[in-house]
Amino acid sequence: MSTQDARERLELLQGTLDLLILRTLIFGQQHGQGIARAIQETSEEELLVEHGALYPALQRLEKRGWISAKWGVSSNNRKARFYSLTAAGRKQLVRETNKWKRLSGAIARILGAEGA
Amino acid sequence: MFGRKRKVGDFSSEIEAHIELETERLREQGLSEEEARASARRSFGNVLQAQERFYESGRWLWWEHFWQDLRYALRTLRKSPGFTVVTVLTIALGIGATTTIFSVVDATLLHPLPYAEPEQLVSVEDNLPGVGAQDVGMSQPEWQDLQRSGIFEYVSPTWFDENNLTGSSQPARVRILLVAPNYFALLEVKPQLGRAFNPEDQSPGLLEEVVISDGLWKRVFGRDPHILEKSVRLDTDLYRIVGVMPAGFDAPGRTAEERNIEVWAATSFYGTPLPDQPPRTWRFLPTAVARLKTGLSAGEAQSRVDALVASLQKEFPGDYPLQSAWSVRLVPLQERVVGNVRHSLLLLLGAVALVLLIGCVNVANLLLARASARGREMALRQALGAGRKRLIRQLLTESVFLSMLGGMAGLLVLLCAKQSLLRLLPEGFPRLTDISISWSVLLFALISSLVTGAIFGLAPALHAGRLDLTQALKEAARGATGSGEQARTRRMLVITEFALSVVLMIAAGLLLRSFWDLLNVRLGFNPQNVIAVRTRLPSPNFPKNDLYSNAAQETPFLREVLRRARTLPGVQEAAIGDTASIPLDQSLRELKVISEGQFFLTFEGRDIQEDQPAAVERSSVTPNYFHVLGIPLLRGRLFGESDDDKAPQVAVVNEAFARTYWANQDPLGRRFKRNRADSAWITIVGVIANARTESLSQADVPQVYLSLYQSASRRLAIFLRGHLDAAAIPERVREQLQAVDPTLPLSGAQTLDETVSASLAERRFSMEMVALFAVTALLLAGVGIYGVISYMVGERTHEIGIRMALGAESRSILRMVLRQGVGLALAGAVVGLIGALIVSNLMSGLLYGVRPTDPLTFAGVALLLIGVAMLASYMPARRAIRVDPMVALRHE
């Protein structure tokens, strides 16, 4: 039974990670390490992204056509694979953001009510 | 399914780049190189795992699993060689046989004819359905009408004939095709040497040039490179050789004779030796090929031809009486060439596919038994985390692998045995040389192997997928195998197998009975001890060269040949007739239709307009013919020596003719004549018994015999009866013939027994093949039921042991087991009989003498199958009653 729980958690995590990646890329193209750093820094280190989990997520998003990738050179002159948002990805971001806001709002209301 | 967009290496280098970037950042924050790297790796998590996750998401895994399964299949199959060999052989048999038949179907029915744009080629068929006459040929003006109609690129009549080639060492009979000068342009073929005819040539008479075949060039001229400077004498006329066709070029004809042309001569079918203005009613052009204008579909062309026919009927009402209902049909040329064999080929393909299916069912059964023996293994695999899909895949890989092995083995046998298999085909089979193991045949073998593997692998695989873990592990530990559901599937499979066998057996049985009936049909003539030796008198283009232009000139020759023939050793009786008088001769069927054969009659005192169909078979014979063939006279008299050109024309008719045209009247003394203005009245002097000389399957074809002394023919058959040396007699006849006229060739010789048997060749072929397949099917079904019953007995050993221990008699045990087997066979037979009813109705055209629902065949086959089922269940049943109760009980 424990495997099932793990899968549920994983799914939730995946969904959020996807959203965060898309959101990060709205500022322009970025490589994997940069995305991880950006999420960590923007969330003021609240969220710890497991870098290993990042790549399958990027893989998935690329396959769905929400982001595209090409090899380039980083600011400190290293070869890296750069990801950028596609038009479809932009739409998906808007959709997902709305969904997330409604969800978190709802959860916040419930939690807030309970807390009061 | 194959290939992935991103390579694994690309992904690894991305991860490396990530770690490098992270290390660098950490170093900038002041960590040491080593610390930075370690920290970067830590925060990345498990690199290997990330790679693995990437890997699994891709398609590499598919291949990986495939190889895994394949290797595993190889290992397990090697461990049970008996099972593997039986399976592979069954499949090899099925795929090999199916592919063999398919290669024939592919070459004859599926491959377009080897001419340019073959779909534009048609054959023109003139019919007079109003008088029951089919394919009656066209007249020269009609050909011109078609040519000018704008529907066709070219139209060329083709007139198959024999000719005497003289000038080389021995006068030879050659097959010649008289065509329009546009013939080769129409087919769009070019000679290998020289040129073809000028397609625009419209000059009268025959062109003085001929094109010869590669075969004739080789046989008669020894591949002479200066052949184009040579001339040949055909029927004493001189022709220049202007071209040699390439080897392998076959004319598009209906019979082997017609396809294997040796000389092509061209004419526009008017002017000496033909009339300057052939009349519209003279349908002397037997058939025509045509090429439709580019872009015109067959349907459009047909409707335009119909319109043309209607307007011609209006324009020439005298030539086209309404009640004859003249119509012109365009038939795809391919159909004309292979139309004769289409039916039997499709029958064979169906039969052989059934055998393959039965083979599949057998193998499925074997696999099922194996699968239940492997129940523990499957359960273990599932327990270790193999998914249901994964298990099904593994089993399917195994079965497809098996069937591929079988398919390859079958193909291998086919490749080795190709020559001897081809020899099984009846002589004169169309497009024999085109039959090859082509890519489409290989593709067929591949696909049928794949499908076969999927079919027989599916049942066991699905079962494995539905395995109940705990149950299976428990059962396997106990040693008992097979769930109730599996047993049900297995019984269903055997029932299917029996049903399929019943269908095949009934088809074979009906064909066999047809063939048997035909073999034993009362011929009405006696073919024994008769040899027909053929020759042909030349027919020069100019009458002054013609030594045999009429009966008066020919009769002395005929009498001299007969006199000499009677002196030959062993000859008791001799007669001469035209080739139409050779009973059941198939090889010259076309010739008969053209110049002898059908004959349109007008009866004295009757208006043809209101009469029944009056196209009858006709042949010309000398007085002794009926004696030699043993056809009895019923009324009146036979011909006499005095019935020659000076006497009034007489005819002998058969009973069918008398009954058709003079139903309750005496036909003797009645007169009829050919349906032509210049024909003389012919008086009926005798009626003979019906004989099946036209067709084995039809008893009462109306026939007219004329006196050869009055109605001469150039194509002759000399009939000799007696105790003859069949090998030597043709040579003796040749000597005698050439003593009378040294330019005459020997065109062929055959005993009448051979002719009768040759007329059955195609039937014999399909009957033998279907019978072969049916026996195979029966064997397979027998093995199938044996397997299932053995298995059931094995499963119930324990139960049987208890029964015996409790005092059950061995007879009752025997009965119990037999009942199971026969029950399965009965269920199969019932399903099969229904299927057979459908199939036998479809093949009613191939039957003779038996109805498609022949109760004897149906009952016989059902009984035979039940017998086989009893036999197959008897052996395991015997084993069952020999069970020692103690052993059986300890079996647990």
Image (tube, rainbow, N blue to C red):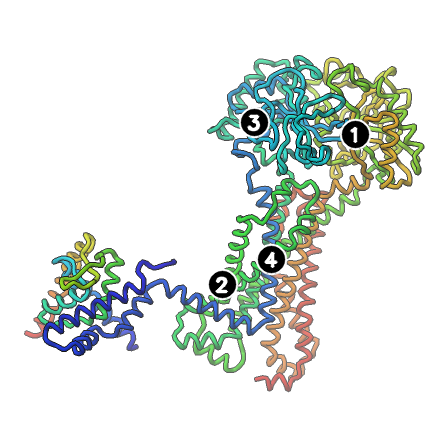
Residue at label 4? B412
- Badge 2 sits on which subunit? B
**Which amino acid does the dot numbered 1 rest on?**
Pro
* Rendered view: B216 above or below B207: below
**Which amino acid does the dot numbered 2 rest on?**
Leu
Give the residue at x 65% y 72%.
Answer: B817
Residue nearest the observer in this picture, B832 or A1: A1
For the residues tagged 4 and 3, is the chain the same?
Answer: yes
Helix, strand or loop for disc 2: helix
- Indicate which disc, 1 or 2, sits on the residue closer to the N terminus: 1
Q: Are marks 4 and 1 in contact (CB under 8 Å)?
A: no
Give the residue at x 52% y 33%.
Answer: B117
For the residues tagged 2 and 4, is the chain the same?
Answer: yes
Residue at label 3? B185
Crowd class of label 1 (few under 14; some 14 to 19; many from 20; radius 10 Å)? some
Is residue B353 in view? Answer: yes
Q: Nearer the viewer, mark 4 or mark 1?
A: 1
Q: Nearer the viewer, mark 1 or mark 3?
A: 1
Q: Is residue B523 left or right of residue A31?
A: right
Residue nearest the observer in this picture, B155 or B765: B155
- Indicate which disc, 2 or 4, sits on the residue closer to the N terminus: 4
Residue at label 1? B171
Q: How far separated are the C-alphas under marks 1 and 3?
A: 31 Å
Residue nearest the observer in this picture, B338 or B70: B70
Helix, strand or loop for disc 4: helix
Q: How far separated are the C-alphas under marks 4 and 3?
A: 42 Å
Q: Position of residue B155 (x, y in %)?
A: 57, 24
- Indicate which disc, 4 or 3, sits on the residue closer to the N terminus: 3
In the figure, residue B659 lies in which quadrant? top right
Q: Are marks 1 and 3 in contact (CB under 8 Å)?
A: no
